[in-house]
Image (tube, grey):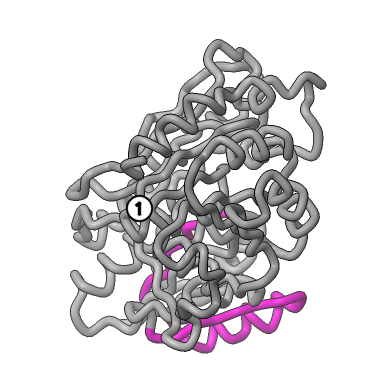
Amino acid sequence: MKILVIRLSSIGDIVLTTPAIRCLKQQMPGIELHFLTKQKFRAVTIANPYIDKFHYFGKDFSQTIKAIREEQFDYIIDLHKNLRTLRLYLETDTKTKWYSYRKLSLQKFLLTKFGINAMPGIHISQRSLNTLKPLGIKDDGKGLDYFIPAEEYIKKDDLPMSHRMGYIAVVIGASYYTKKLPVEKLKQLCGNIQHPIILVGGKEDIPEGDAIATVDPVKVYNACGKFSLNESADIVRQAKLIVSHDTGFQYIACAFQKKVLAVWGGTSPKLDVEPYYGSAMQPRYTNYIVPGLKCQPCSNYGTKTCPKKHFKCMQLQDMDAMTREVMKDCGL
């Protein structure tokens, strides 16, 4: 039996599908499990032992459709549900059985545009698992997975001497402006924490990382842009604790059962996307949300500017409370 799981983007959303992938592979012995995503997200699942074959696409989705058609899948599990996957559905063999997860687009629209919360309160990872119920798949409660290729584990020598005995990881990047703390707030946090800190992010975050590190260039190491995605994931894996915006690294940290301080701006846990550890595991996170803001969440994924122009959801974050929790959890 051949099964294809589809999640086209992004890093965090792909990580959030991993319980469904694991449960499928373990609870349906003998299946050949394939996974379809964008080429640029190859690193996220390349080492996942539950996936037998990968399908990636770039600009030419027609070639992808042809390749998928030739595979003659018994089942296709659509955990993305957009126009591309609809096109794939319309152009694949009618003998292939499709299951799609509940995307809840209307409920998200009502919440972000009118403040009407009609969300079911079921985490997106759980909704992905629920999609598999017709196949007899049950939640094993083990939470998220993330697998790092052996060649991308970082060595102690890759980090400054000052950070080799332990550090806190602060993820400073995010896909949109309204999901990110302002640099001054991050400088305040890093200045207050009396412990080595590693800033995690991509090449686009280097300038902000350099600015934040000026509070103490010895204590704060700017790793942004210096490591691959999987190497950065290993930095998160080895951290004592993670402070993160609503990004993929928040969920990668959960996969490693790390304590997460999740900082929320334009998005919100009300969208059923907060840190997820699995029903059989002990949750280890704190959500930092400015209370009483009627405008939050303002979007599903974040925006380039604050629609209200005040950006209170990040400007009013309590950095002192965040600092106290970091210090307490690290025994400092």
Which part of the image, by quadrant, shows the C terminus? top left
Residue at 50% of width from left, 34% of height from top?
A: 271
Q: Is residue 63 magenta?
A: yes
In the rendered image, the vertical position of residue 313 relative to residue 70, given as above or below = above
Horizontal relation, residue 142 to residue 241: left or right: left
**Residue 180: percent from left, percent from top:** 67, 40
Quadrant for the N terminus in the image: bottom left
Residue 274 shown in magenta: no
Dot 1 alpha-carbon crowd within 10 angstroms: few under 14, some 14 to 19, many 20 or more: many
Residue 41 position, x and y percent, is 60, 71
Which residue is at a point 19% across and 60% down the rendered structure image?
136
Give residue 133's quadrant in the image.
Answer: bottom left
Q: Is residue 80 visible?
A: no
170 horizontally vs 282: left or right: right
Residue topped by disc 1:
258
- What amino acid type should be assigned to the residue bearing mark 1? Lys
In the image shown, does 20 or 226 lie closer to the viewer? 226
Query: The magenta stretch spans which residues?
Result: 52-81
Would you place residue 66 above or below residue 188 in this image?
Answer: below
- x 52%, y 73%: residue: 230
Q: Position of residue 22 (x, y in %)?
A: 29, 68
Q: Position of residue 75 (x, y in %)?
A: 38, 71
| Label 1 residue SS | loop
Q: Is residue 287 above or below residue 99?
A: above
Say left or right for 212 vs 332: right
